[in-house]
Structures are given as C-alpha cells and as structure tokens.
Image: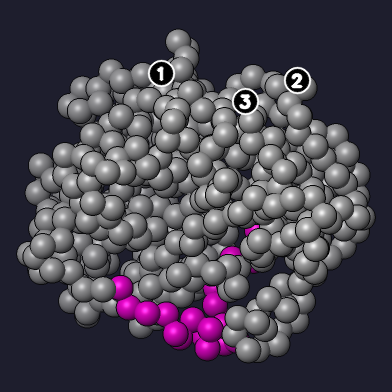
Amino acid sequence: MRKFKLVTLLSFFLLAGCASVDKSDLAYWSKMPDLEPFTEEDRVLILAPHPDDEAIACAGVIQQALEAGARVKIVYLTNGDHNELAFIVYEKRITMRQGEFVHMGKVRQQESIKAMEFLGLPENNLVFLGYPDYGTFNIFSRYWQTDKPFRDRLTRISSVPYKNNPSYGAPYCGESILNDLTRQILDYKPNKIFVSHPADVNVDHKSFYLFLQVALSDLEGKILPPKVYPYLVHCVGWPKPRHYHPELELYPPHKFIGSKIDWSRFDLGFDELDKKYQTILFYKSQTQSSAFYLLAFARENELFGDYPVLELSAQEKGDKPVSYFGASRMFKEVSGEEVAQVEGDGQVSYAQEDGYFVVRVDKAMRLSNRFGVLLYAFGYSRDTAFAAMPKIRIVTLGRKLRVFNARKGVLNSGVELEFGNKYLIIKIPLELLGKPDYILTALKAFHGNLPIDAVGFRKIKLNR
C-alpha cells in the first residue's frame, strides 16, 4: 500500500444520514455557542440562492439586525423560476412555455419583496440578479471564457430575462455572476455575510457559496475581510419533524457530528418566531406545495456554521504513514462517547505530495469494481484570473477514470488512480489545477448509478 501522510480526517457519511437529531446527539450539540449579537455598526449582507431562502434561514437575523440599527441588504442569485412542481400546484395548470417560467420568477420576486417589507426591509435593499434557477453550479463548473453561455434546458434562455433586474441581459456565464457579486460586495462593504452552505445538496446553494469564496479572494486588500456565516437548508431527511413546531430547537443534521464545522445558534424571541412564521407564509407559490417543509425551519433558533479552512504542507514520498480511524473512533475523540459504527461509513483525507494534490477515500467494506467517485477540484491563484483557471472534474469507476476541464475531456492529464480493496487514491498534478494557492473541492461516491456518500465543498490552502 502506498505510504500516505494524513493531514486531516473527515467522516464520510451516507446521504441518508441527515435525519433529525436523536437523544444521543443532544449532548454533542448542547455546547454550540451563540452567534454574536448585532450592533448599529454592522453592515449585514444576506446571499439567497432563491426567493424564500432568506426567510427560512435568516428571518430572525434580519429582525434582530434591524432592531439593533444595523444595515441589511439581500442579494438573490436566482428568481427561483425552475420549480415546475410548485408552479403546477400554485397556478393549477401545466405549461412549458418560456414566458411562463419568467412569470413564475416574477411571482417569486414579488413574494420576497412583500415578505421582506413585512420584516421591515424596503425593496431598495433587495437586489435580484436573476440567473438561472438550478443552473448556476453548471455555470460555475463549466461556463467561463466561452462564446456559448449556459442555456437552460427548460426555459431555453441563455441570459438574464428580467428587465427590472440590474443584471438584465447578462449572459449565463461565470464572469457575469462573479462580476455582479463582486460589485455588490465592493459597493456595500459588509462586515457580516450570511450565505448558503457548501454541504447543501441543492446545486444553487453550493454555487453561491463558491462564487462568494472567489469574490472575497479577488477583493483581498480592497475591503476589510467580512465574517461569513453559512446556513443549511437542503439536507435529506432534515429537519424533522416536519411542519411548524415553535416549541422545538433546530439542531444540525446527525451526519455533521465529527465534521469539525463550527456551528453557532441564533435564538429568536417569541414575537420574532411568530413573525418568521408569518413571513414564510408570504411565499404562497412555495407553501401551497411545501409548507410542511418550509415551516419546519420556524423554530426557537437559526443555525450557522462553516468548515474550517484546511492547510496542507508539501510532503515528500517516504514520509511515515499515519493510520486511519473509522467514524466511531473519530466521534469518540471529539465527544468522549462511544457510538456504534455505521455500516458502510468511510472517510476522506487530503494531502499535498511531490507536486500532486492527493485525495484518499477509505471505506470499511471492500470496494467493488462498480464503486466510483465524482471529484470536483477548482483551483484559485492570485496570479491568474479565476475565469482562466482550470475547472477540473474527475469521474472514476473501478480502476477507470476520465478527466474533464470544464466541458472538455482532458487526454494525458497526468492524474493517477490507485484502487485498493478498501481505499481509493486520486493524485492530481498541481500543474493541471493551474498551480493554485487554494482548492475548492467536493466528492460524491457511487455504486454504479446509485449515490451512496458525499463530502461537501472544502477550501484547502496549499503551502509551497
């Protein structure tokens, strides 16, 4: 087996492991610190992938920030015009015409305007960019420096269609979104930013976090670094129980025990919680089909937390290997309690070795030839515009692999794959990644076409 020095260790849980917290988790989550209170000096920026995310995740934050005299601004990445099921239930008709999708986007925009006015935030504090719902991750990973922007498969639109939005007519490409977001941050200069979580399973939620990371890196030295508070919305089977339960607290999903996310809670008073409940009901286009889900976020507190940045030092071949531990051992180290090993659990670790970025997946059970992974690796360099940096995507199945840079396959990539009985190692040349200062990376595991595991996006800093 290849010698491999462990730099960091992440629990690698089943996607189905997002179920509601149980009694054994309460002691673990009871030590969550409170989010710091707001002051009148604060300039709060909330980044919402869709109209309604700002309410279900941050309605309490908005109320208390305004009460403290802080400034609050919301930027929406999309108008949420791709939710066909909600459209059918709300409009009580089926249509696939282009104009109807734009109509739904306008409906959702007006819902947010009215909901935020109810919370005390005027319309001129809201910015709707209008990029494609369910298309922004595709844009982030594949559409840069191109004459053919992303074209939505349902709307058949390839530029922002909302005439009253500041981004009207902007092509669906990475430069458009990054430039718009960077401009908003540079003009507003927030000191606190609330954004969707990198481990959220919704692709627009992931992408807004990624665009933010790039924008803040580009703005280093131009603004004071703001504090960033990611919020989680989409995780399979969470939160439970569904429906409105104001008597309950909101805990992180069980899957994040041992993940090293620094969670914080933000408590709501009775009146603030009631107002959050009423605010969510303004989104009639969504609540008519999903009230049981959206109202489950109206609880005693809101949650925010991010992974820490991982820093890797260059290593040489022959370094002494470090043993790998299972999820139950990791939990014991963190909490002092013993729990049962979850069947099928594994872990992912990262290293920088001899000019390569190395990703290792360990599984408790023997890997079959139908086991594979989808690995994203987006490098950032201070010396190269992000638009020109490689956007690497690696797909493996058994001992086979394919490498893509944005939409093009890469031949002779130099990527190495080692497939063992219970481990998988992928070695990516740093040259292929554009000699980055840091990497934004995530991984999904499959058995055939069946997804079984996932690790959210992490920011990994390289020291050379």
Q: CA distance from mark 2 to mark 3?
A: 10 Å
Q: 86 left or right of 163? A: right
Q: Nearer the viewer, residue 119 or 284?
A: 119
View extreme (top): residue: 147
Q: Quadrant of the N terminus?
A: bottom right
Residue 128, image x and y in percent? 24, 37
Which tag is nearer the camera, tag 1 or tag 2?
2
| Image location (x, y in percent) of residue 451 | 72, 49
Residue range corresponding to the magenta coloring: 14-35
- Callout 2, which amino acid? Leu
Classify 10 Å Cα crowding around label 1: few (below 14), some (14-19), many (20 and above). some
Name above or below for residue 212 compared with residue 63.
Answer: above
Residue 6: x percent and y percent? 71, 62
Query: Picture coordinates of residue 121 (x, y %)?
Result: 12, 53
Amino acid under disc 3: Asn
Q: Which mark is residue 411?
A: 2
Identify the residue position indicated by label 1 in the image: 158
Q: CA distance from mark 1 to mark 2?
A: 30 Å
- Relative to 19, is 385 on the left or the right? left
- Circle 1 — which element? loop
* Disc number for residue 405: 3
Residue at position x 22%, y 56% from top? 191
Q: Earlier in the sequence, mark 1 or mark 2?
A: 1
**Residue visible at 21% across and 73% down in the picture:** 37
Residue 173, which numbered label? Answer: none
Horizontal relation, residue 148 to residue 6: left or right: left
- At a point 42% along the width and 27% down the height, the residue shown is 385
Q: Secondary structure at mark 2?
A: loop
Residue 73 visible (yes or no): yes
Question: Which image quadrant is residue 197 in?
Answer: bottom left
